[in-house]
Amino acid sequence: MVRRRFSDEPKSSLAVWAIRIALFSLAMSALSVIIVRSGFLEIVPALATFAAALVLAALAIVTSFAAFVVIWREGVTGISYAVGAMFIGMALVGYPAYLGYHAYRLPPITDITTDPADPPRFDVIARVRPRGSNEYRRAALADKQRVAYPEIGPLRLAAPAQAAYEAALAVATKHKWSVLDARAPIAGRRDGSIEAVARTPIMGFRDDVAIRIRVVSGGALVDIRSASRYGLHDFGVNASRVRGLIEEIDDAIGLLPVEKKEPEKPAQPAKRPPARR
């Protein structure tokens, strides 16, 4: 009797289709990331491509489940295809599911600042933002921010305003943000300001960041603002960025060398003229 080789055994067609769909969804996801990061097209086509990729990833997961059932009942091969499709699909759907969890527990905010009453302004960035970006509506978001992030507030430093400005600029440079404007503070004339564009880790969405340094009695007051250009929800990204900046600037100030003052020499008593006899 001629034994049939393992490679000749029938494979589950569902498993084959599951891996095909999963690989195609992976390619579409990578394409959407490339579109956003390169700026080759506007944001809407990229989001539409990514949404379609997620739908296909979910379809790949469902198909792989069906393939598992067929493989178990009929004894056909293709388990590796089904497992691969399951892994790819869950990896692609996992990140949006994580964002959905944050969207459920956090309010829909796209603009966070340490000073809701008088937030740092976007001057240079406002002139270069593309059409279709979110409008800055701080008045509508201030109350929501106070409820969701009551711990976010200004950073008061017992250091010169120039040192605070240099520390903030160093932090922005460390993160490799695109700094579009940077003006050092001048006491009695203007506040220090930094305007930069940050990118989200995976998709590379552009978020706007403004840092204001004011000269106050005894040191400097640093206010920060971070706003998303697109979407109705930032999933807590801007609040996390503001908190991180506060900690990093505070730490950077603490690492500045302290100027050592030479001890003052005690004043020598003046010599009295000799008494006349």
Image: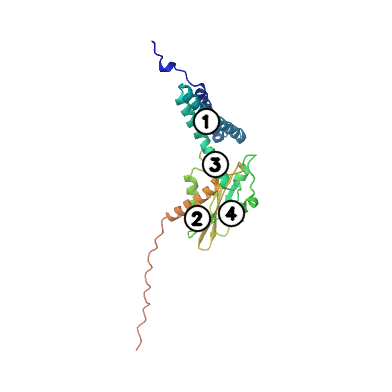
Using the image, tell me which numbered label, if any, was put on residue 147: 4
Q: Which residue is mark 3?
A: 99
| Circle 2: element type | helix
Looking at the rendered structure, the secondary structure element under dot 1 is helix
Above or below: residue 172 compared with residue 157: above
Give the residue at mark 1. Answer: 61
Q: Which badge, 1 or 4, is on the more N-terminal residue?
A: 1
Give the secondary structure at mark 4: helix
Viewer-nearest of discs 1 and 4: 1
Residue 111 higher or lower than 41, as above or below = below
Disc sitting over residue 162 in the figure: 2
Image coordinates for residue 3, horizontal then vertical, percent? 39, 13
Which of discs 3 and 2 lies nearer the camera? The answer is 3
The N terminus sits in image quarter:
top left
Residue nearest the observer in this picture, 241 or 93: 93
Percent x, y for residue 166? Answer: 48, 52
Side of 133 where 215 appears, left or right: left
Residue at the image position 51 percent from the left and 34 percent from the top: 92
Q: CA distance from mark 1 to mark 4?
A: 38 Å
Q: Earlier in the sequence, mark 3 or mark 1?
A: 1
Q: For residue 238, say whether it is visible.
A: yes
How far is disc 1 from disc 2 in space, using C-alphas?
Answer: 55 Å
